[in-house]
Image (cartoon, rainbow, N blue to C red):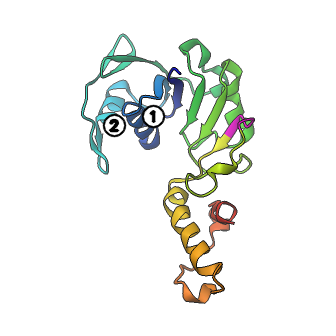
Amino acid sequence: MGKVKVGVNGCGCIGCLVTRAAFHSDKVDIVTINDPFIDPYYRIYMFQYDSTHGKFHGTVKTENGNLIINGNSISIFQEGDPSKIKWGNAGAEYVMESTSVFTTMEKAGAHLQWATKRVIISAPSADAPMFVMGVNHENYDNSLKIISNASCTTNCLAPLAKVIHIHLWYRGRTHDHCPHHHCHPEDRGWPLQETVA
């Protein structure tokens, strides 16, 4: 089976990490990146250096308007309207929506106009189904065209919360035995309650 061809919309922190991860995978090929806000040279800098994940150990440069990572040419778009990004022309079958702007089914759905099969939103969504690995990923249905991978916070917290939920609550204990923070996730748009329940 060949590599999955992916386009990344938004080359900020998450977009760069997705692209880095793809270069350590034999299953994913980043074929295009869209980001109307970042200068090509700053994009190279952001990709090469990450304060948490360290320096990218490979080569990154720009050439003829494309980004060249480890000798692989990635086409670059600088389009603000997702309905105008010609993902299919660049060979992208899947789009990683990582701008935190197009997070609803309607807005993220604009990516599907150019022969794209699926859109994965890297932020919480008001209406797209949300999946977190290790929590509810087995509920994924292949017929879904747009999904959310929830938030960074949820991906860090939900797997731990699931373990606590299973091992404390299901054994007849109450929340009084577990320290908690006095915030209300539903007020902040965190899908934790839906994800863990």
The disc label shown at residue 11, or none: 1
Q: Is residue 97 above or below residue 180?
A: above
From this viewpoint, is residue 130 visible?
no
Helix, strand or loop at label 1? It is loop
Q: Residue furthest bottom?
A: 176
Q: Based on the displayed image, in which of its 4 quarters is residue 196 positioned?
A: bottom right
Q: Are marks 1 and 2 in contact (CB under 8 Å)?
A: yes
Label 1 Cα crowd, 10 Å radius (few <14 / some 14-19 / many 20+): many
Q: In the figure, is residue 39 to the left or right of 181?
A: left
| Residue type (three-letter) at the residue carrying disc 2 | Met
Q: Nearer the viewer, residue 96 or 43?
A: 96
Q: Which residue is mark 2?
A: 46
Percent position (x, y) of residue 184? 63, 72
The structure residue drawn at horizontal position 38% and vertical position 27%, both measured from the top left corner, is: 39
Q: Does the magenta portion include 143?
A: yes
Which stretch did the figure color magenta?
142-146
The structure residue drawn at horizontal position 47% and vertical position 29%, both measured from the top left corner, is: 27
| Residue type (three-letter) at the residue carrying disc 1 | Cys
Position of the C terminus, as image quadrant, is bottom right
Q: Is residue 149 above or below residue 94?
A: below
Q: Is residue 114 above or below residue 168?
A: above
Q: In the figure, is residue 53 to the left or right of 184?
A: left
Magenta segment's dominant SS is loop
Q: CA distance from mark 1 to mark 2?
A: 8 Å
Q: Is residue 11 above or below residue 156?
A: above
Percent position (x, y) of residue 124? 62, 51
The structure residue drawn at horizontal position 55% and vertical position 34%, both measured from the top left corner, is: 96
